[in-house]
Structure formats: C-alpha cells, structure tokens
Amino acid sequence: MTGWEMLAVAGAGFAAGGINAVVGSGTLVSFPVLLAVGVPPLPATISNSLGLIAGNLSGSIGYRRELRGQRRLLLTLLPASVLGALTGAFLLLHLPAETFEAVVPVLIGIAVVLVAVQPLLQRRLRRGTEEVPPPPIRGWRLAGLFAGAYATGSYGGYFAASQGVLQIGIFGLLLRESLQRLNALKNVLTLAVNTVAAGAYVVVATDRIDWWAAGLLAAGSLLGGAVSSRYGRRLPAPVLRTAIVVLGIVAIVVLVTG
C-alpha cells in the first residue's frame, strides 16, 4: 500500500467505527475502500471484520449508560449471536470463492436498501413509549429474539454490512425499547459476533488476512467509535445515510466490473 492508500484505509476505519456506533453499516464505508486499494473481496471481508472490532469495543463503552437494565437480555442473546458468528465464519471459509464474489454484491444491495428505508423503520420503532411497562420476554417473543440473534450473527460472521440495521429491525419489533437502548444492545452483540468470527479467521485463515489493512482499520475505528458514541448523535442522519448508500453502490460497481 502507498502512503495515501494507508491514510485512506485508516480514514475509512475512523468513519466505519463512527457510523457503526450510532447508525450501523460502517462496513459499507470500509469495505469499498479496501477493494479500491487492491484487497481482494474475501481477504477484504476477513480483514474488515478483524479491524472493526476495536471500533465495536469503543462504541459499546460509549453506550454503556443505555445498557443499564439489559444485562439479563444480553446474557440470553449472546450465546445465539456467538453460535451464529461461528456459522457465518464457517460458511465464509468453506463456500467457494466464486460463490462469495457472486453473493457479496447482492448482500451489499440488500444492506443499501435497508439503510435507505431506515427512517421508516425508526418511525415504527418510536411508536412504543418507555412509560408503558414492557411485556415480559418469554414464549414466542423470546424464541423470536433468540432466532433473530442467531440469524443476524450468521449474517455478520459471513458479511458484516448492515448487521446492526438488521438487529435493530428485528429486536425493535419484539422489544419495547427506545432506539438508543436498541442501539446499545446492537453494539454489544455486534462486538461479540465480530470478535468470534475474527477469532475463527485468525485460527484457520491467517494467510487470508491483510494485517496492514486490519491494523489501520483497527486504529481508525477505535478512535471513530469513541468520538462518534460521544458526539455522533448530533450529526444529521440524512448525511450519513446518503454517504452509506453512495459508497455501497460504488462497492457493487467495483465488484461487478472488477
């Protein structure tokens, strides 16, 4: 990598870490940049997951106040997320590379659509009020949350883009919580998924990791997650959403024409 390319990757890590902390879908920023500097799709996905863990950690710490009262729920959902992450990592490492390269543009396209329609989702989630005592989490709701954590964990272990948006969408339909508390829950589960998946990559696919890219992303995302979790809520959501959609389209074009 040239000096400018290294700077671009670190900057992408900063942006991705910040976006993941308050919106989700930071991979749609960092992944296209990795492709643009010449990292192949499969190593880019693995290195990206590894590099963004630092930002997941700083973002989770930044949202620690919103996690109050959610300890039991986290302990319930974490095993499902971890199992899902292992499933996704297994699929990524064992499916043919041609299959991955064919699927990624579709996944990015789905993620872009999810980001674009996120305001509609948020308006639906805001219909619940925090003053009304939430119903107990059991029965079909508990099963739905567990299945949702496993499904999004599998998706995150395979390809992380918009994992957070999927989590907020599913959990928001089953939990009567504010968006900020849902976002805090999302941050911790995403941290778990990315950490487990990255650990699997390090053990069985070390040769597919671009360590320079992962390190630069980690440095940038650590700072981005910390800054954004403190100040990012003040940024206009339409600006972030537009940037994610544009960069997602760029990634699709690069993959299809590359």
Image: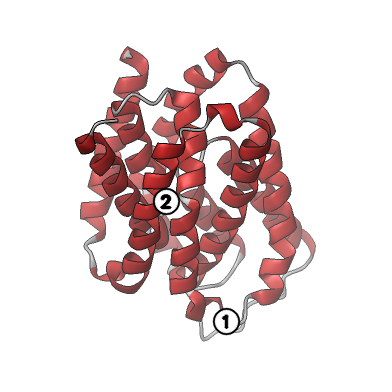
Residue 129 visible in the picture: no
| Mark 2 or 1, closer to the camera | 2
Q: Amino acid at mark 2?
A: Ala
Secondary structure of residue under mark 1: loop
Q: Quadrant of the C terminus?
A: top left
> In which image quadrant can residue 135 be found?
bottom right
> In which image quadrant can residue 198 be found?
top right
Mark 2 or mark 1: name the one nearer the start of the chain.
1
Residue in view at x 43 percent, y 73 percent: 62
Q: Nearer the viewer, residue 56 or 72?
A: 56
Q: Amino acid at mark 1?
A: Arg
Q: Residues within 10 Å of mark 1 (few under 14, many from 20)?
A: few
Q: Quadrant of the N terminus?
A: top left
Residue in view at x 37 percent, y 67 percent: 226
Report the residue marked by disc 2.
218
Position of residue 228 in the picture relative to residue 76 (left or right): left
Looking at the picture, how far across and down is residue 247, in whole percent? Answer: 27, 37
> In which image quadrant can residue 250 be found?
top left
Looking at the picture, how far across and down is residue 31, in whole percent? Answer: 38, 36
Looking at the picture, how far across and down is residue 72, in whole percent? Answer: 71, 74
Looking at the picture, how far across and down is residue 205, in whole percent? Answer: 62, 30
Report the residue marked by disc 1.
68
Secondary structure of residue under mark 2: helix
**Do the numbered discs 2 and 1 sit on residues whose CB atoms are within 8 Å?**
no
Q: Residue furthest right?
A: 139
Q: Nearer the viewer, residue 152 or 20?
A: 20
